[in-house]
């Protein structure tokens, strides 16, 4: 980094599965900006576009912009367990994930549908299970 360059601000963005779409919202509650998309890539693009558009409007209207949003920024996406499971559905079965994590399929369905929220340790097991299956799939190549 050059001496004159400021570090880039990171904007936390939460992504969840909402009904039949991914939904994204800026984690900073001072910035009310949301977007949806059918795919994870689409919702990530849509929230960035929506946030840029919202910021332009705030500046043009003379509204106060929360600190960090005026500098160069980069998004940092955080997926809920429900969003992780829905994303993983396109690549792995719940049965395979149940075998990998030791969490039964029905319970995984409850988490994916939002009927239940996993505890932090269970959330970690699900994420590690998805990562483990993904890693083993790369060995096929």
Image (cartoon, helix red, strand yellow):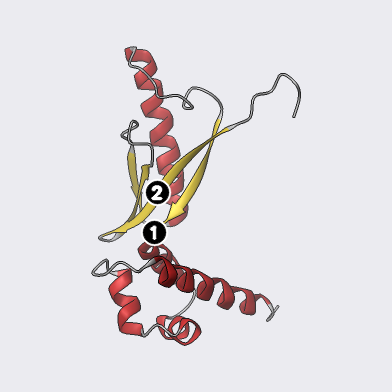
37 relative position to 126: left or right? left
Q: Circle 1: is it few (<14), some (14-19), or many (20+) Cα within 10 Å?
A: some
Residue 125: assigned label: none
At 35% from the left and 56% from the top, the residue drawn is 16
Tally of marks: 2
Reply above or below: 90 against 34.
Answer: below
Reply above or below: 99 against 61.
Answer: below
The quadrant of the rendering that contains the C terminus is: bottom right
Residues 21 and 116: in front is 116
The quadrant of the rendering that contains the N terminus is: top right
Q: Give the mark nearest the N terminus, 1 or 2.
A: 2
Reply above or below: 137 against 42.
Answer: below
Q: In terms of secondary structure, where does tag 2 sit?
A: strand
Question: Residue 33 appears in which quarter of the rendering?
Answer: top left
Q: Which residue is mark 1?
A: 80
Q: Position of residue 13 (x, y in %)?
A: 43, 44
Q: Cα distance, mark 1 to mark 2?
A: 7 Å
Check contact, mark 1 vs mark 2: CB within 8 A. yes
Q: Position of residue 66 (x, y in %)?
A: 40, 24
At 56% from the left and 78% from the top, the residue drawn is 133
Residue 16 seen in the figure: yes
At 35% from the left and 17% from the top, the residue drawn is 64
Q: Which residue is mark 2?
A: 14
Question: Residue 74 appears in which quarter of the rendering?
Answer: top right
Q: Circle 2: is it few (<14), some (14-19), or many (20+) Cα within 10 Å?
A: some
Residue 90 seen in the figure: no
Q: In terms of secondary structure, where does tag 1 sit?
A: loop
63 relative position to 48: left or right? left
Q: Position of residue 71 (x, y in %)?
A: 54, 24
Q: Position of residue 135 (x, y in %)?
A: 63, 74
């Amino acid at each position: 980094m050059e001496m004159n360059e400021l570090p880039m601000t990171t904007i936390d963005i939460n992504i969840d599965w909402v009904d039949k779409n991914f939904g994204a919202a800026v984690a900073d509650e001072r910035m009310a900006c949301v977007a949806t998309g059918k795919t994870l890539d689409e919702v990530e693009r849509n929230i960035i576009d929506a946030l840029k558009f919202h910021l332009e409007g705030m500046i043009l209207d003379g509204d106060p912009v929360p600190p960090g949003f005026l500098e160069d920024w980069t998004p940092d996406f955080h997926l809920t367990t429900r969003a992780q499971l829905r994303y993983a559905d396109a690549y792995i079965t719940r049965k395979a994930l149940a075998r990998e994590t030791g969490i039964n399929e029905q319970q995984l369905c409850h988490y994916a549908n939002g009927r239940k929220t996993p505890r932090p340790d269970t959330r970690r097991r699900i994420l590690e299970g998805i990562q483990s299956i993904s890693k083993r799939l790369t060995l096929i190549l």
